[in-house]
Image (spheres, rainbow, N blue to C red):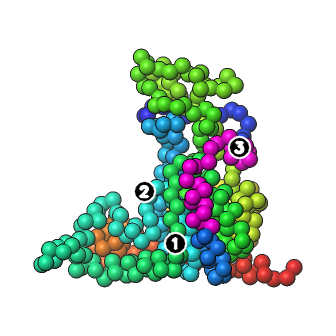
Amino acid sequence: MAEGSLMKNSTNGDMTAADYFATNPKPASLDRQSTIARAFIEQHASEGRRVALVTSGGTTVPLENQTVRFIDNFSAGTRGATSAEYFLEAGYAVIFLHRHFSLLPYSRHYSHSTNCFLDFMTHNEAGAVVVESEYQQQMAEVLERYKKAKRENALLLLPFTTVNEYLWYLRELAMQMRPLGANGLFYLAAAVSDFFVPAERMVEHKIQSSEDFHQDAMTNGQGGRAPAAHMDGKSLMIDLDPVPKFLKQLVDAWAPQSMIVSFKLETDPALLAKKARYALEKYAHHLVIGNMLSTRKWEVLFVSADGGERWIRVPASRRTKSITGRDGDLWENAESREPAIEIESWIVPEVAKMHSQMIEKSRSPG
């Protein structure tokens, strides 16, 4: 998005979920991906296996149909990709609905921004490309876990880029997961845009920054409204509509028997518990996991439907620091080489335990 642009919310009434899907086009790949997901879900449903839909990464909001400019949400997909591995380790099959090019389960160990994957490779005496000897054991362990997930067909990767793609996929996958009943789990770790450009207010071509090539601001407007993104003199004006609140639809209509976990990211510690509890009560789902932007890698707040609030904190001596071994392991410091704990390795077992309790409750008479 161009620097110095102006964003403001639409003053119109909020759009309903039904209105959204009636007025915004479904992704071209939706039917094909739906067919793949159906087969995946049917396999694991027949085996009585739990299935977790893990969403991960940020969503974009295109400003043009032929997109050059867009608004993006901050997220590399670390929490989602890491959590997906631990769900697989806990026996779940995982549908990983992720932002295209964000971190993926298993390959994330070799996707650090400070290291190139080729740093782990070398040539042997015969000239063949091999893994450096110091990294072979750790890479072999990651590879075996990945191969196991592949052999069992336990991991399905489905990419999205825009918020529109995300919302269509979420609804479709929720419908596909209905036969799982209480064995379905939604772990909504994606950073989803709160605002979007409705299809009817999207300009077709690149917005011209030069005043000599400005398009008529009302050309694509409807009902007297200008296109959502347009130039006004030398300023780029962006008038966004709020994304409908789909979590309530997910809870009440799309996946009423599944366990649903959402995340709440804040920067003000005074608001975290209050906003997490508010979201839980408003949408009536099972668990909100709150985290602060600055400490999200080593502490989270569980706010559950039973009224409980509790922190999960990694001890200071085992927290992830900026020093990262090229073998993919995280270390507290170079002197002790004490392995850091990924907080997702504690989050996921707790979620799975709550899911087990919910399943048992659903089987109890009355």
Q: Residues within 10 Å of mark 3 (few under 14, many from 20)?
A: few
Going by the image, does 283 lie left or right of 342? right
Name the amino acid, label 1.
Answer: Leu
Q: Are circles 3 and 2 on residues that touch, CB within 8 Å?
A: no
Point out which mark residue 22 bears: 3
Q: Residue at x 72, y 48 (%)?
A: 17
Is tag 3's residue or tag 2's residue first in the polypeptide sequence? 3
Q: Which residue is at the front of the view, 276 or 284?
A: 284
Name the amino acid, label 3.
Answer: Ala
Q: Looking at the image, which residue sits at the far left? A: 125
Q: Quadrant of residue 277?
A: bottom right
Query: Mark 2 highlights which residue?
Result: 101
Is tag 3's residue or tag 1's residue first in the polypeptide sequence? 3
Query: Mark 1 highlights which residue?
Result: 155
Going by the image, does 314 lie left or right of 221? left
Q: Position of residue 41 (x, y in %)?
A: 62, 71
